[in-house]
Amino acid sequence: MAPTYGVVDGKDAPARNLNSAGPGVSVVRKNRGFSLIEVLMVVAIMLIILAVALPNVANMNASYRLDGTARGLSSLLQRAHFDAIADTTGYRVLIYPSTAASDSNSYQLQRRTPAAPFDLSAGGSYVDDGDAIAIPSGIDMTTSATEIATDTHAIFFSSSGDVVDSSGDYISSDITISLTNTLNSTSTVTISTTSYVSIQ
């Protein structure tokens, strides 16, 4: 005999099966949570992804810093060229390579005072035009520019914006400044004999 839960019209009514949903009846079941094994598997997958991604992110950051440093140096050289023309005076960019005993891995823009075309003509001296700019850590700098003092190189611009040597003579070959990061990637800033600045 079927179990009953009451009497309807004098007859026994069958009990409802509360585990099955009939018309208009919603059944709420208890959700089963994640097991420890499932959680550990997700964590392991995330760690693998991080292990693969982090070196790539570090390499990208090193490349971006190298490119940004080269662009910054190139912009300063171009500024020296145009400021020399605008101010009708000599400018120079001092380069302190990574091997320098002091101020290593930095560069500094300077202008001639009193105004004069070249470095050694008619006396005078150079004064800083802005702060020295440090090369970010992890990047080494070398240059073929003229060494005017121990560990100090200089790129000279005449009052007409031409790249010259310390005596005011036109340079006979291009000047290069090489920047190398920890990945041994190199970016080279070149100043041509016609004062054109490029990055390779």
Image (cartoon, rainbow, N blue to C red):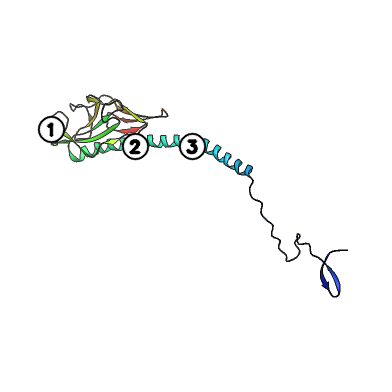
Q: Nearer the viewer, residue 6 or 119?
A: 6
Comes first in the chain, label 1 or label 3: 3
Secondary structure at badge 2 equals helix
The answer to whether 186 is drawn above or below residue 24 in the figure is above
**Which sits in the foreground, 137 or 186?**
137
Question: Is residue 77 positioned above or below 33 on the image?
Answer: above
135 vs 113, left or right, is right
Q: Amino acid at mark 2?
A: Arg
Distance between the Cα atoms at labels 2 and 1? 31 Å
Which one is earlier in the sequence, the residue at label 2 or at label 1? 2
Whether label 1 touches label 3, CB < 8 Å: no
> From the viewer's perspective, is the residue at label 1 or at label 3 nearer?
3
Q: What residue is shown with label 2? A: 71
Separation of disc 1 and disc 3 at Cα? 53 Å
Looking at the picture, how far across and down is residue 98, in whole percent?
31, 28
**What is the three-letter code of the residue carrying label 1?**
Gly
Residue 112 image-quadrant placement: top left
The residue identified by callout 1 is: 124
Residue at the (60%, 41%) spot, across then down:
40
Q: Residues within 10 Å of mark 1 (few under 14, many from 20)?
A: some
Residue carrying label 3: 54
